[in-house]
Amino acid sequence: MSGLHVGDPALDPGILWDALARWRALVRLRREQFQRLEADPPDPQDYWRRRAGNYFDAVRSRQDPGQFVHAAIAECQDAEAHDTCSALGAEPRPATVLDVGGGFGAVAIPVAQSGRRVTVVEPHPTMVALLQRWASEAGVADRIRVVQEPWPAAAAGLEPHDVVVCSHVLYPIEEIVPFVEALVAAGRHACLITLRSSGVEQAPTALFRELHGEDRVPQPGFGDLCGVLAALGFHFDATTYETDATWSYADLDEAEEVLAQTLLVAGRPEARARVRDWARTTFVLEEGRLVGPRRPSIAGIVTLHPPVSRAPSAIRPARTRGRP
């Protein structure tokens, strides 16, 4: 398999012209590839227990919370200014924020530190424990509420929030339409969604190909998201920015463990040895952590402003023949 292209028997060529069908195909084919190649798949709970700590340490070490957080805070300020005008000069009410798939708080914590109340929808217990720990250490535990349910099921029990954010969550979501529709419906003022323009893997494509004899199926990216929103008739603003896609690890053992899982070779000792050797010769020690090569990446932010975010004459895309 050499990736997705016209003529690949796994894809009807017509799918490439149907944004929704292409999104679903990318997610499905990547999942099927993982299931086919992974010799000893980890328990999902254990997988995130191992990965969450690595992400947590890497994110907390950043000086700047990131452009997506700045955009979310700006939308909060706009919402507060709008409420002030509507109330004829009354004191602005701090905007409320709904963070869907908020993980351990990469967005929620700095937004709460800016004075806003944040509801975080996050089903995974390890992520929730890290979020609560960070919120307590940052002194914002009283501003953060956790809803430990999956989205969009969690939407039914939530009140509308001024601003809804969803950061790097959509990549594995095959049924993207109800997911996004619930995001937009949950916001009074704005809904912000961010994705990378292309998937950024922790290990290079060449190493995946060496270990499996085929290319990794790519994740859907920011351009795919814009195509889906346009096809569904949503009005939105889109902007891109450069972000750091460099990964870091506490030590060589953690690098081997995380990379072996990412490369789908956790259960293959000979492949793990190759991964460890690659990490040893690739990463360098910086401030007590093993850091990979600097790799800037392009990410994008979509901003939707309900209730006029969908065109009145929106036409849903036709399903591609023989595809879900």
Image: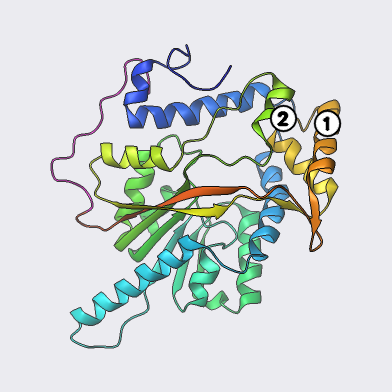
In this rendered view, identify the residue nearer to me: 83 or 44.
83
From the viewer's perspective, is residue 69 above or below residue 156? below
Spatial CA distance of label 2 from label 1 is 9 Å
Q: Dividing the image into 4 quarters, which one contains the C terminus?
A: top left
Picture quarter with the N terminus:
top right
306 is within the stretch colored magenta: no
Q: Mark 2 sits on what residue?
A: 207
- Which amino acid does the dot numbered 2 rest on? Leu
Q: What amino acid does circle 1 point to?
A: Arg
Is 315 displayed left or right of 15 in the figure?
left
Image quadrant where residue 132 sits: bottom right
Residue placed under numbered mark 1 in the picture: 274
Pointer 2 and pointer 1: residues touching (CB < 8 Å)?
Answer: yes
> In the rendered image of this protein, does residue 202 appear above or below residue 154?
above
> What stretch of residues is rendered in magenta?
309-324
- Residue drawn at x 26%, y 30% is 317
